[in-house]
Image: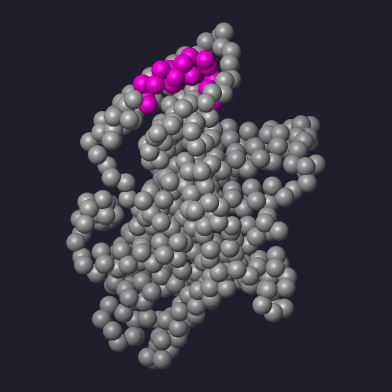
Amino acid sequence: MHIKYSYPLIFWLIITDFHLSLISIVGSFGALMCMLKIIKAKPIWPRIKWGHLKYFCWLIKQIFLSSISVMLAAWSRKFEVESVFCEIDIKNMRQDLTILYAHSITLTPGTMTVDVQKNHLLVHSISLSGIQELEEGKMKKRIANIQ
Amino acid sequence: MTAAITILSSCLIGVAIKILFSRSTLEVIISASVLSITLVCLYLFMDAPDVAMTEAALGACLSTVVLLTIGSRMPKLLTKAVTPYLSLFIGLLSAVAVILMCYKQINNYSSIQKPVHLHYSNKYYTSNLKEDMGIPAFIAGILAGYRSYDTLGESLVILIAGISLILIINPNLGGGESGVNKTHLKNEGNNIDRNKSMLSIICRIIIPYALLICIYIQINGEVSPGGGFQAGSLVGSVFIVYSICSRTISINKKYLVITAIGSVLLYCFIGVSGIIFGGNFLNYGVIPLPHSQHLAIFIIELAIGINVASIITLIYLTFHDIRKR
């Protein structure tokens, strides 16, 4: 059994303050399985690796930097919105990494993923420089390094 | 703490003004959802996490989704709201005048010397709850113990609301098989709609943990804030989120009605078992079992949770079916 199936158990122990009682653990997991069966959800238990955490720290830094730059642009008097749409290539990328990429683009202020297609992401940006940064591909390289 | 409450309250006023001056129905619905999220934060800061949970599930999730469903079916003439500035101004001015006139009387509304806080029943509840009910949580003790008649009435009201809704929207309910029809949304692709993959994959990761929180709130209702109403509304909103993001959900509405009625019957059965063992209706102390009060309150909270969850899902599915037709 892989460690990824123990995430719900760890989560349950954290929210119950490590009160180990067999009845509550077994009962709650039985109820969880019933509810997942009722709505026919196929849950995903993602494998979290060291690379994910490193990427996450880098992403938080990027979010801070880009929110500061967007804020400065919005408060400056000569601010003009150059609304740009752009297609970003995601060929040969695994699906979970694609989703991670798309959400990272949305989380950094200024750029937003509008649509996920088979070979490209449709990205909207409020300035040309945001798109240029994306096309340089720093973020994409870091995501590719995770696996 | 006070600063946070002040900031959030001023945000509330700002959003309310935004709602008054917004130009389309979509804007109004989204701003109302933002208002409700702000209220959730405000309740959290005011030490009312159970109210915050209910507000998040009902105000931010269910009512927004239902209003969006109705709004998408409205004729285009109606969706363009025109703001009548003059009458709005007069109305606001008169409201401010009334509030200023009442100001002196509502001055000490929350003072501890008001008759509401000095009534003997409050003192009785706070000093005798642990002996009478055997549980530490006040809200659960009052809700399912001292005032269980009221709670029975509330769960009946929820049941009647759901059933009357389905009777109004599906008028041929009594007319044979087609009445309570099966909601089967179309299954696009194999399991993931590529356009929605951003939403659906994140939902499939988060849903088990959200359901675990619901179960935690449900089974710890007697010892911490929470209980049947909160857990039920959270389960209902998880179902709604899942059915929005993946189009493969299929729940038969008949089963939802059956579970809602069954849970109210379970509540009544607990009440009647008090009569069987020689007490009054809903007097669980006379049942000859160890910790009978605690057990009965647990089952009653469970019944309320199942009732609320099935009715909320039923309301969503009923409105979803109209959109499909």
The answer to whether B21 is drawn above or below residue B107 in the figure is above
Q: Is residue B156 left or right of residue B266?
A: right
Q: Is residue A108 magenta?
A: no
Q: Is residue B32 left or right of residue A138?
A: right
Magenta-highlighted residues: A124-140
From this viewpoint, which residue is outermost toward the top? A78
From this viewpoint, which residue is outermost toward the front? A92
The answer to whether B185 is drawn above or below residue B134 in the figure is above
Name the colour scheme: one colour
Percent position of residue A141, x then y = 34, 25
- The quadrant in which the C terminus of chain B is found is bottom right
Q: Is residue A129 magenta?
A: yes
Residue at horizontal 39 percent and vertical 34 percent from the top:
A93
Q: Is residue B208 visible?
A: yes
Residue at horizontal 57 percent and vertical 8 percent from the top:
A78
Q: Is residue B298 left or right of residue B11?
A: left
Residue at horizontal 68 percent and vertical 74 percent from the top:
B178
Image quadrant assignment for residue A28: bottom left
Percent position of residue B162, x then y = 60, 67
Q: Nearer the viewer, residue B231 or B46?
A: B231
Q: Nearer the viewer, residue A101 or B114?
A: A101
Q: Nearer the viewer, residue A101 or B87?
A: A101
